[in-house]
Image: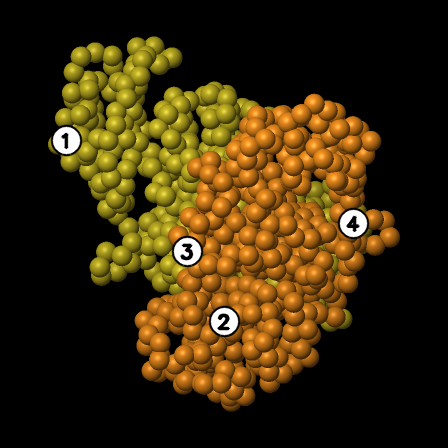
Chain colours: A orange, B yellow
Amino acid sequence: MAEPLRIALAGLGTVGTGVIRLIETNCDMIAARSGRPIKIVAVSARERNRDRGVDLSSYAWVDDMQAMAGRSDVDVVVELVGGSDGPALTLARAALDAGKGFVTANKAMVAHHGLELAELAAIKAAPFAFEAAVAGGIPVVKGLREGTAANALNRIYGILNGTCNYVLSEMERTGADFDEMLVAAQDKGYAEADPAFDIEGVDAAHKLAILAAIGFGTRIDFEAVRTEGITHVRASDIAQADALGYVVRLVGMASLDDDGEESRLLQRVRPCLVPFRHPLAAVTGPTNAVVAEGDFSGRLLFQGAGAGDKPTASAVVADLIEIARGQCGAPFSVPVTALRQCAPADPGQREGSDYIRFTVADKPGVLAEITAAMRDAGVSIESLIQRGRDRDGGAVQVAMVTHEGPERCVTKALALLEGSENLAAPPLVMPILKD
Amino acid sequence: MAEPLRIALAGLGTVGTGVIRLIETNCDMIAARSGRPIKIVAVSARERNRDRGVDLSSYAWVDDMQAMAGRSDVDVVVELVGGSDGPALTLARAALDAGKGFVTANKAMVAHHGLELAELAAIKAAPFAFEAAVAGGIPVVKGLREGTAANALNRIYGILNGTCNYVLSEMERTGADFDEMLVAAQDKGYAEADPAFDIEGVDAAHKLAILAAIGFGTRIDFEAVRTEGITHVRASDIAQADALGYVVRLVGMASLDDDGEESRLLQRVRPCLVPFRHPLAAVTGPTNAVVAEGDFSGRLLFQGAGAGDKPTASAVVADLIEIARGQCGAPFSVPVTALRQCAPADPGQREGSDYIRFTVADKPGVLAEITAAMRDAGVSIESLIQRGRDRDGGAVQVAMVTHEGPERCVTKALALLEGSENLAAPPLVMPILKD
């Protein structure tokens, strides 16, 4: 059998130790599939003496992880430290610059610096792979890069954050409000002590930017992702959606809109109303799911565990096997020089239906003001329901679903209503996912 | 850009013309992803002058498709003729023997002769790929071969036949019986005029044998697939399952059972009861879906269109892109010499719950006889429902769900009841899919 692929592992948290366990547990099978053994030669982490439940004695300990990039006994550096910049980025640059392969689960770094790293990898002809950066154990980077390679994709969308999906589907199951279910998620280990990155949609936005770049062959543009989290979704919204035949999910959605002269990229993370019959409606708990719609393949769904030490380790080692086979392709599906620069699309041009919830004072004339604003902005109302006083006291909830129309009209209607004394809280708009 | 990959296409039915349309429509994108153009140079079919809606004038017409294997201007032969043996197999052998790449959508041929062809491909160092042979446009061959490559898989199962899934989910939706929905499927083009291969489970068995070989790294063994179709499933079974919290789906299931000394492979295609909450329960119509359970990845689901000209073309061209990139790996995930020979597992050892439906004479003592047979065979009954006379006249339906236990006990109970005058029809056993 050929020479082993020699790995240096930076970061020994749950994912790092998961990778060690996986490589030890399945070493024979991995060697058979790789055509050669995959061998960890060096490891590095902040604390050397912490008990991690794995035996590190057969690996060289490296105090300064940056030194890994310079080791002549290392073929691939695996970075599981995290953080979009700082030591992780320094290590990525150093490893690729030294011509070594670089594998990472770091979605923030790939979202912010993926293009630069792919350029460096191309110059050095060094493998650069990040299956684990998107949707944990689901092989969706490979799915988009290779599985749908023959297709022009129309849309890529999905449930990209397990914390949000757990909270929303538990709100749905129990009828409880957001705050209560967030605490439940923290208790179960599905949410961090500081959950902001997850519940504000930033984590999903990182993943969406990566998927869009791969699926559309565009230069990654995380800054252009319009992101909205789930903190404003109320139990009453979920009940209302249910009555209308929908569930609420945080959906990351990317589409390439052709405005005649050039293609523009729309990237958004938002809570959406998903029809009961849509496969994403059945995705509950911390599961992730990605849909890719190809012009020939039709709608493809990839679903599985979006996080966790073992699924993430599965994705990291899949990348290593590919590198060991010598089959690691362009990180973003086409050579980095062929990636297109797409300007962000104007979301106002999106044609669709929206759910809009107003929290209003319970007095005469409120509905008249809202419906007049809709009329003046050209928004056509399909259904409207006014519910009794909510638990906050005097305010009343008015929910409506619009007929399909350009999003800019809804934006205009809300602008007309801005500052109205009748509104007790900012309205919440959730698009209805088109089947 | 590098030299084009030159293709000869045998078979110009709906899939063949779909491949031509796809390569013409997305040629620039395919070239960008392949690193070189993919160019059709020759085509062959039985009738030359049929109007297929595509312009064939720029391709060489080959009267005898076997001649394609000998052409010096061809790198890869794509076979879309069909049939497990005959001309398709002759062409496969000739193409690989000539050192050409060989791509096929022919599940019957791969199920029967995939091992022989993989051996020949290995000897000749010729690419051999068949993504389109399983589940149409879903990249599940790649998903199992590469996406889950780091995992030991526990089970591979799924909905592998769109005709059966359409019929079963329409029976569920409408309450109609099998025969009526089969005609509806034929009207919609989801079932062939002669539907035997589909409804008897043979088509699903072909795909299951291929997935099992890839996922478990075993020598493909189609003969060992125990296959049962959906022709005996009645509307009343589906209603009964619904009342118990299940839907009925034709499930292909493969698992590697360790009996201490050696691994044995269980491969089965059977109608099963699928819990409402399981993702396969949400798969309706002609859609396919495959679940792979890895020891690290956990449960992964791949879902999409299981047939049709465009999805199948998407899979064929994905294989061609991979070959153009020079990244085509071992067809069954490990080198053919490393594939294990696994004896078939004894299905009697399966531990699980079953749904059993008896059609019995409506007279005293029937239930006593059935329950006594269950007791004597060691089958524990969880629930039992006797329904009124069915439409056939005097017969009555008795449905039960067993507690979890070895399948051999159920088999024994049915053997004890064989020949009983109280049974008006052979019993139907459907296993309950474990979540």
Residue B185 left/right relative to B74: left
Q: Is residue B150 above or below residue B231?
A: below
Badge 3 or badge 2: first in the primary sequence: 2
Q: Amino acid at mark 1?
A: Arg
Asked if the residue under mark 3 is in contact with the one under mark 1, i.e. CB atoms within 8 Å, the reply is: no
Q: Nearer the viewer, mark 3 or mark 2?
A: 3
- Is the residue under label 4 in contact with that under label 2 (CB below 8 Å)? no
Q: Amino acid at mark 2?
A: Leu
**Image spot of residue A248 (x, y percent):** 56, 40
What type is the residue that disc 4 sits on? Asp
Q: Chain of mark 2?
A: A
The residue that disc 2 covers is: A80
Picture quarter containing residue B189?
top right
Cα distance between the residues tagged 3 and 2: 19 Å
Q: Residues within 10 Å of mark 2 (few under 14, many from 20)?
A: many
Q: Which residue is mark 1?
A: B375
Q: Measured from the top left, where is residue B404 in percent x and y?
A: 24, 39
Left or right of B259? Residue B127 is right
Residue B337 in view, yes or no: no
Rounded to the nearest whole Å, what is the CA distance between mark 1 and mark 2? 56 Å
Disc 1 from disc 3: Cα separation: 45 Å
Q: Earlier in the sequence, mark 4 or mark 3?
A: 3
Q: Residue at x 54, y 88 (%)?
A: A70
Secondary structure type for disc 3: loop
Q: Mark 3 near mark 2, Cβ–Cβ under 8 Å?
A: no
Q: CA distance from mark 4 to mark 1?
A: 69 Å
Mark 4 highlights which residue? A346
